[in-house]
Amino acid sequence: MDKINIKNLEVFAHHGVFEEEKRDGQLFFISCSLYVDISSAAKTDDLNKTVNYGSICHDITNFMQENTFDLIETVAQKLTAKLLMDNPIVRKVWFEIKKPSAPIGLPIETVSIEVERSRHVAYLGMGSNLGDRKEHLKFALDELSKVEEVRILKVSDFITTAPYGYEEQGDFLNGCLKIETILSPIELLDLLQGIENDAGRIREVRWGPRTLDLDIEMYDDEVIFTDRLIVPHVEMHKRDFVLKPLCEIEPKLVHPIYKKTVEDLLSMLSEHKI
């Protein structure tokens, strides 16, 4: 992918653990690479089809000077997120922040941190069968919309489905959504479980009743198998309450293991071929 590079932008700002760093401020040097496709801009000579690096430099400067953080790790994380989420044409960002006046009492040229973040597309399943089911699902959407590292792209209609696995419970209201995020799979899982907890979910019975259930069905075309997270969701191809709403918003989405589209998987499930 093409890159637009900015090297050693000088910004005087007030970040650091020590009180004098926040009070007196110091000079920071910031470099970044913005991964974009410049082909359309190059053909048309149109600035609107690429990234305005002058505006990016001003955005970085304003962010650095309008905020105060203890750690340059926090600065790097938040600023990288801002650059990605504010500039949809940018697919990935590499970012370095140098702190040449780091107060360590030893001769050193500079201390720096580098981070790299990319955009990812994930598909989430939602379900509820306790209390006001629709309100619980709307709560999840509202909470996700507040997260700066997440952008909701599509939301399915909500459908009523019979319980799966443990059948001695009420019907579920289910839906799916497509999001764009710069969170890693585990970071996204932590976020979703936090929203579930805020909705009052209690985990007592596997596949049992719940106020809110949020699952990562797919994350890009990655295959993940860890103690905490399996992606694609291990039984999504057997669940019409996942496939039906997912087919509504992304019928041609291909399952990375079975190499079938969502609409094909749904058709196979309805014909009892899975």
Image (tube, rainbow, N blue to C red):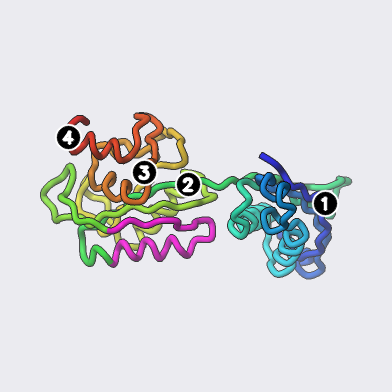
Which residue is located at x 21 percent, y 61 percent? 130
**268 is within the stretch colored magenta:** no
Can residue 18 be seen at all in this image of the molecule?
no
Label 1 – label 4 distance at C-alpha: 60 Å
Whether residues under marks 2 and 1 lie with C-beta atoms below 8 angstroms apart, the answer is no
Q: Amino acid at mark 2?
A: Val
In the image, the segment drawn in magenta is 135-157
Residue 156 drawn in magenta? yes
Q: Position of residue 256 (x, y in %)?
A: 40, 32
Task: Give the alpha-carbon distance from disc 4 to disc 3, as whole Å.
Answer: 22 Å
Residue 8: numbered disc: 1
Amino acid under disc 1: Asn
The amino acid sitting under disc 3 is Glu
Q: Which residue is mark 3?
A: 217
Q: Earlier in the sequence, mark 2 or mark 1?
A: 1
Q: Amino acid at mark 4?
A: Glu
Q: Pinpoint residue 28: horizontal percent, then vertical percent.
A: 80, 57
Q: Quadrant of the C terminus?
A: top left
Image mark for residue 228: none
Q: Residue at x 38, y 62 (%)?
A: 141
Q: Badge 1: how crowded within 10 Å, few (<14), some, or many (20+)?
A: few
**Could you tell me residue 215's position as x and y percent?**
35, 48
As measured in the structure, the alpha-carbon distance from the residue carrying label 2 to the one carrying label 1 is 31 Å
Nearest the camera: 202 or 78?
78
User: Could you tell whether 125 is left or right of 61 in the image?
Assistant: left
Residue at point 40%, 56% (across, down): 154
User: Is 172 in front, or is 203?
Assistant: 172
Calculate the distance from the C-alpha at mark 2 to the C-alpha at mark 4: 30 Å
- Dot 4 crowding, Cα within 10 Å, few <14, some 14–19, many 20+: few
Q: Which residue is mark 2?
A: 121
Which mark lies nearer to you, 3 or 2? 2
